[in-house]
Amino acid sequence: MNTNSIFGIMDFLIIGAGIYILYSWYLLMYKGEIKEGVLVSQGWAKKCKDLDGYRKFIGTKLLALAVVAFLSGGVCLYSDYVKPVPSSIYLGVTALFFIVLIWFITQTKKAQTQFFYS
């Protein structure tokens, strides 16, 4: 891969997103805080009907997204700047990231209807 490509910038952003999502997971699981903007829209965090149920439902999913984002960004950065990995691995981790991201979005919408709406 070309190290001057836009993909390198995107990979840094994906790793950063993974770290931020991991921080959101920490806040949710250990401090009981719902990070607005990541899990719910602004103003919705205080409207949660069952915080413990929400934590159990979304916690592992949030951790999975963080790990996959960090892994995907790391593999792609390694390929961009250190040593090229086979295209199948590069595309595979990128596809895995987008599949997990779409799955997480659907689970977040499900959690919103279950734990926030009356």
Image (cartoon, rainbow, N blue to C red):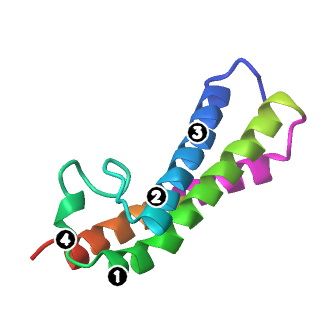
Distance (Cα) linking label 4 and label 1? 11 Å
Distance (Cα) linking label 2 and label 4? 18 Å
Nearest to N terminus: mark 4 or mark 1: 1
Q: Is residue 55 magenta?
A: no
Distance (Cα) linking label 1 and label 2? 15 Å
At 88% from the left edge and 32% from the top edge, which residue is drawn? 82
Residue picked out by circle 1: 53
Where is residue 110? Give x, y as percent.
Answer: 29, 74
Q: 88 or 94, which lies in front?
A: 94
Nearest to N terminus: mark 3 or mark 4: 3
Distance (Cα) linking label 3 and label 2? 17 Å
Q: Is residue 39 left or right of residue 15?
A: left
At 70% from the left edge and 52% from the top edge, which residue is drawn? 71
Which type of secondary structure does the marked residue at label 3 adopt?
A: helix
Q: Is residue 9 left or right of residue 60?
A: right
Q: Residue lying at the far right in this picture: please name it.
A: 83
Nearest to N terminus: mark 3 or mark 1: 3
Other-residue count near label 1 (Cα within 10 Å), few / some / many at <14 / 14–19 / ≥20: some
Residue picked out by circle 3: 16
Nearest to N terminus: mark 2 or mark 4: 2
Q: Is residue 71 left or right of residue 79?
A: left
Q: Which numbered circle lies on residue 73?
A: none
Q: How many marks?
A: 4
In this rendering, the answer to whether 26 lies above or below 10 is: below
The answer to the question of whether label 3 and label 4 lie on touching residues, with beta carbons closer than 8 A, is: no
Residue picked out by circle 2: 27
At 63% from the left edge and 33% from the top edge, which residue is drawn? 12
Residue picked out by circle 4: 116
Where is residue 102? Give x, y as percent.
Answer: 44, 61
Q: Which residues are magenta?
A: 83-98
